[in-house]
Structures are given as C-alpha cells and as structure tokens.
Amino acid sequence: MTSSFVTASPAVVGVTHHTAEVNGTTLHYVSAGDTGSPILLVHGWPESWWAFRDVIPLLAATHRVFAVDLRGFGDSGIADGDHDLTTMAEDLHRLVAHLGVGPVHVTCQDISGGPVFAFAATHPGDVLSLTAVETTLPGYGWEMLADVKNGGSWHVGFLAAPGIAELFLAGRERVIIDWAVSAMTTVPGGVTEADLDEFARTYARPDGWRGTAGLYRSSLAGGDRMRALAESRPLTVPVLAVDGVNAPFTELTMRQVAGDVTAVTVPDVGHFVAQEAPAAFATAVGAFTDRVDRRRATAESPHRHP
C-alpha cells in the first residue's frame, strides 16, 4: 500500500512524499523524476532523506530518484521490533518490490553502509550498482570508529547504548547534531541552520533515537556476521566508493567486498559529501550510474550479424 504523505519538512520543488507499509513498519520516502534508471538514496547519521535535498533535483533530471528514511529515522515509523541493520536491509528489499522499479542503483552513506551492503549482497537481483559514500562496514573497519583509545569517537558507544540518548538528549536533540556537523564538515554553510532544525525535528519524536540505537548497536556487534556474508556473497555489481575528508576509508573497505570498484575523492569537503558538495556528488553518481546503464544495455542488446 502506498499513500501520499504530509510532512513538516520544508518543500523541495519536484519532490513528492509517500509512505509504504513494508516489513511490519511504515517507511517514509520521497520521489522525483519520471525517466531513466532508478536511484535509491539511503541516508546516514544524524540525518534523514533531507540530507539529499539538493542532490535529488540534479539526479532527477535524468533518473527516477527515491530517498528513504530508514525505520526509526526521519518520518518513518518507529516499530516495536528490531531496528538492526539486518531488518533494515530487508526493509529496503521490500521497498524496492513495493515501488516496482527494481533493480535500482543504491547509494549509502555513513552508518547506512551496513544495511545497504547486506541488502545488495542478500538480494543481488534488486541492485544495478552500489555507491558507498564516506562509509565502512562492520568487520572491515567500522569498529575503529568506536575505539576511543585509538582515535575513535565517543558518540558511537553513546548512541548504541539502549535508552541513553533519550535520557540525556530529550529536548536537546540539536546539541549532539550541532556537535556532529561542526566536527565533521569543512564547507561553511554546507549544512544550514534550517537543515539542523529539520534533522532535530525528527529525532525529537517520541522514541526518536530508537532507529539510531538499534543500527549502531547491531553494527558494533555484527562484524563476524558481515564478514561471513561478504565472503559468501561478494558484490558482483559495479561499486563506486566516494570519499571526502576520510579518504581512502570507503575505497579500502569496498575493495575487500567487491570486485569492480571505482574510487572518487571529492576534494575540500568533510564527511557530509552530499550536503557539502551536492553538485560534485550528483555528477559523480550520475556519471557512474550512466556508465553502468550503458554497459548493461550493451550486454543485453542482441548480437547483429552482417
């Protein structure tokens, strides 16, 4: 079932809001564009679909574009059950089936790398390509992000602890969001005050940190499982690794789990590439997906004989 959706998010020209009832929850997603191969954008933390607000119109000129709020994030439902990466991966599979546009070019960034990789590896028929942005995977370096003794960040364990974010951040959601953005961006104004307000709005919902806690917790505990999945089902679709300030972190991860990897570093940006450099981001993703589409069309075209 699909329904239109009224959201408190500011309007973006050409972008429409929808909900889909899948896998025991309600997913909010947006769509734009009506021609070309489909692209599914999946946000990181502390974000929602809104992280792609400036990218979507650029890609929608030549593609059908969808951006989803993961369960427990943005305006998607906060379900009673699990909010772990495996469940979120299945959500994406069900969403693609619901949309009826698959297979898709899927893009992940930051913490959504785990769910998106699991989705692509488990349901390869759903995926044309995978673009990974400023991300790594459990078992392949993600745990380093939480290792405060060796340069990791305190916020990973904090957010993974059940109930702790709600306890300390209720009514003060923007405190940690402001900190994260200021610590991880290099482009002044790349993330605006209005953007920060929009992200904070969604985390201020009742149980608004449940998706974050479940995803972080399952990522910290999921290294062995992810390695087993990656070793048994390495990606066979083309992969684009996009790095900003943390280059070559994403590239190094993707080369361990996929055979066909193209690497791009966007210069002079921090962690939030889609927000800090939307035009460069859209250009990289658009050029990559178009190349994949051309290769696929050539491979599928009938052989002609003189």
Image (cartoon, rainbow, N blue to C red):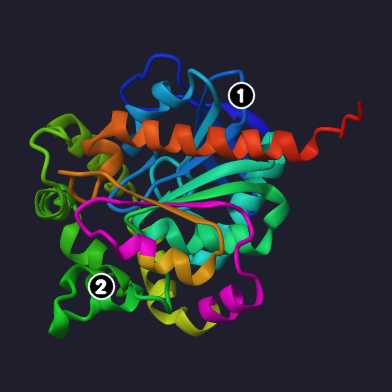
In this rendering, would 10 be left or right of 237? left
Residue type of the residue flagged with mark 1? Gly
Lower position in the chain sequence, tag 2 or tag 1: 1
Q: Is residue 100 visible?
A: no
The alpha-carbon separation of the residues under discs 2 and 1 comes to 37 Å
- When the figure is inspected, residue 55 is found, relative to residue 117, above or below; the finding is above
| Image quarter (top left, top right, bottom left or bottom right) of the N terminus | top right
**Residue ranking furthest to the front:** 306
Q: Which residues are magenta?
A: 226-251
Residue type of the residue flagged with mark 2? Leu
**Residue ranking furthest to the top:** 13
x and y percentages locating residue 273 in the rendered image: 27, 43
Q: Is residue 231 visible?
A: yes
Q: Residue at x 32, y 38 (%)?
A: 51
To which residue does mark 2 refer?
A: 145
- When the figure is inspected, residue 167 is found, relative to residue 45, above or below; the finding is below
In this rendering, would 134 be left or right of 137? left
Q: Secondary structure at mark 1?
A: loop
Magenta run includes residue 230: yes
Q: Quadrant of residue 236?
A: bottom right
Residue placed most toward the observer, 61 or 50 = 61
Q: Secondary structure at mark 2?
A: helix
Q: Residues within 10 Å of mark 2 (few under 14, many from 20)?
A: some
In this rendering, would 116 be left or right of 20? left
To which residue does mark 1 refer?
A: 36
